Image: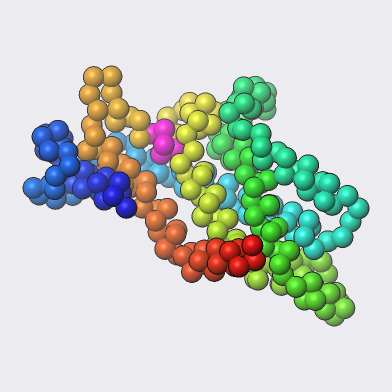
Amino acid sequence: MYPLIWMGLTSLRTNFELYENPWGLPSALIFENYVKVWKTSPIPTFFFNSIIVTSSSVIVIIMLSSMAAYAFSKLRFRGSNLIFYGFLGLYFVPPHIAIVPLLFTLKALHLTNTYFALILPYVAFSLPFTTMLIRSFMISLPSALTDAALIDGCSKFGIFFRIILPLSKPVLAVATVIQCVFVWNEYLLALVFVNKRNLMTLPIGLMDFVGEFHTDWVAMAAGLSIATIPIIILYIIFRKQILIGMTTGALKG
């Protein structure tokens, strides 16, 4: 917690006071730093872009991963394990080595400097891990539930939406928070694929406070605090489901 507390205290002081006593408490709480950052910098635009990219990416990731996890855990078809482990192997491909071919591909598709230039790679690189995470939970769900639903005439899609998804809320909450943190904080892909200032996300936009000869550390601390608040709120909202999911995973081994 100390880095977060220090960041919050730094955002409520002046640069002079920070240089004079960086580890001390501020003599006065200057909330005008937040107002200044929000009104005099493009932070609101970067914040809005991050919300669009993160929400769109996470919705698609959770939707596709949960459907794939359902297929790999509950549907019986030839070669399912082989396909799953082949799909899981993509998790070991670092995004960094794919930057150059991805850049050429996005340029050929005229997707650079758009939201899709970030959303599509985020979804692609997040699917293997998220599918593995959700599948490990769905395997523990009793097959008797799905078998009884099939006997009652429920379709496979009906079983997925009416039985599997409601029971998988804890792991879906864990996956949502993990992917939100990843997409919200991602820096390298956002730096390479988006050059237009009005489409930049928060991690890139916060570098505006770093100059060649001077860095406005107080303004940066305020910007970082603004960027951290949504993730903290998200964790507070899903904390019960996260604890249930983590406890279930621990007990299941």
The residue range painted magenta reads 201-205
Which secondary structure dominates the residues rendered in magenta? helix
Residue at point 51%, 55% (across, down) = 177
Question: Which residue is found at the position 46% from the left and 65% from the top?
Answer: 239
Q: Report x, y in % for residue 220.
A: 28, 37
In the displayed image of the protein, which residue is found farthest to the left? 27
Relative to 142, residue 99 above or below: above
Relative to 186, 39 lies left or right = left
Q: Could you tell whether 1 is left or right of 216 in the image?
A: right
Q: Is residue 122 visible?
A: yes
The answer to whether residue 251 is above or below residue 16 is below
Asked if residue 33 can be seen in this view, the reply is no
Residue at 64% x, 51% y is 130
Horizontal and vertical percent position of residue 75: 83, 61
In magenta stretch: residue 179: no
Q: Position of residue 142 (x, y in %)?
A: 75, 73
**Residue placed at 59% from the left, 40% from the top?**
122
Q: Look at the picture and state if 171 lies above or below 85.
A: below
